[in-house]
Image (cartoon, rainbow, N blue to C red):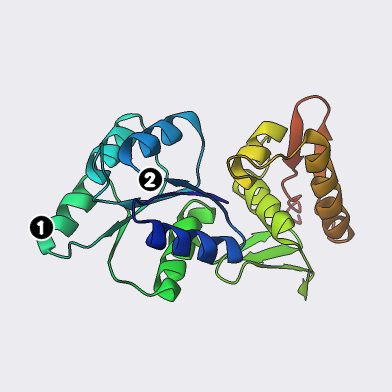
Amino acid sequence: MRILVAEDEPTVAEGLMRSLRQAGYAVDCAKDGDEADAALEANEFDLLILDIGLPKKSGLEVLKRLRSRGSKVPVLILTARDSLNDRVTGLDAGADDYLAKPFELAELAARVRALARRGMAGGLALISHGALTYDQIGRVARLNDRPIELSAREVGLLEVFLHRAGRLVSKDQLVNHLCEWGEEVSGNAIEVYVHRLRKKLEPGGVRIVTVRGLGYSLEKPETKAASA
């Protein structure tokens, strides 16, 4: 999962990025509204954490432009303003959640998990895919009810595949969702990560198939025919 943090206060931005990276997310940062707007136009993110009081373009302007382009990326607004009018204005502009400064990182992490769930399986905490279950809150996968040991990168891959089960996912899409700006990840590296995840899932009959030259697809689980 890839997150954009749009925050102009260096201390706050660094704390957010450190906390989110420790949780296993890929995180990029924009320090003003122009940077945030350009990043959102040029890249695909799974979540936007947006400070209202950005320089150059306000957070509300960034949000309105994002929604005008038809983007449905979840948006969590951060602001020092905690009046009812400010909350209503942000939500009416298209925000999904609202957190007033100062805040505890534990609360932020919980809100991030909740917003991330909305994009997968209709917001369910537990996703089932054949013999595989994935707990979106704890970010824990189980196969045939036994926990699977996954690296942070493998968890990220699994989330992308579950979100797009049965659909083709290109290597470029995987890189975009898993990697931060300036992070060099080759196509060969993606192949290695997918191979490792595939080996851990196949004992339970969960298959990631390669579509040569195009990408990968997590096969939908077979449905048993109804008995006569």
Whole-percent x and y of residue 194?
80, 46
Type of the residue with mark 2: Lys
Question: Mark 1 — residue?
Answer: 85
Name the residue rendered at 75%, 32% in the picture: 215
Residue 66 placement: quadrant: top left
Q: Could you say whether the residue bearing mark 2 is in a helix, strand or loop? A: loop
- Residue 142 relative to residue 37: left or right: right
Name the residue rendered at 35%, 29% in the picture: 69
Name the residue rendered at 82%, 57% in the picture: 201
**Which residue is the extreme one toward the front?**
10
Whole-percent x and y of residue 185?
73, 40
Question: Mark 2 — residue?
Answer: 31
Label located before the other in sequence (1 or 2):
2
Q: Identify the mark at residue 73; answer none if there is no mark.
A: none
Residue 70 placement: quadrant: top left
Residue 196 visible to the viewer: yes
Whole-percent x and y of residue 195?
86, 47
Type of the residue with mark 1: Asn
Question: Do the residues bearing badges 1 and 2 touch, measured as CB atoms within 8 Å?
Answer: no
Q: Nearer the viewer, residue 115 or 123?
A: 115
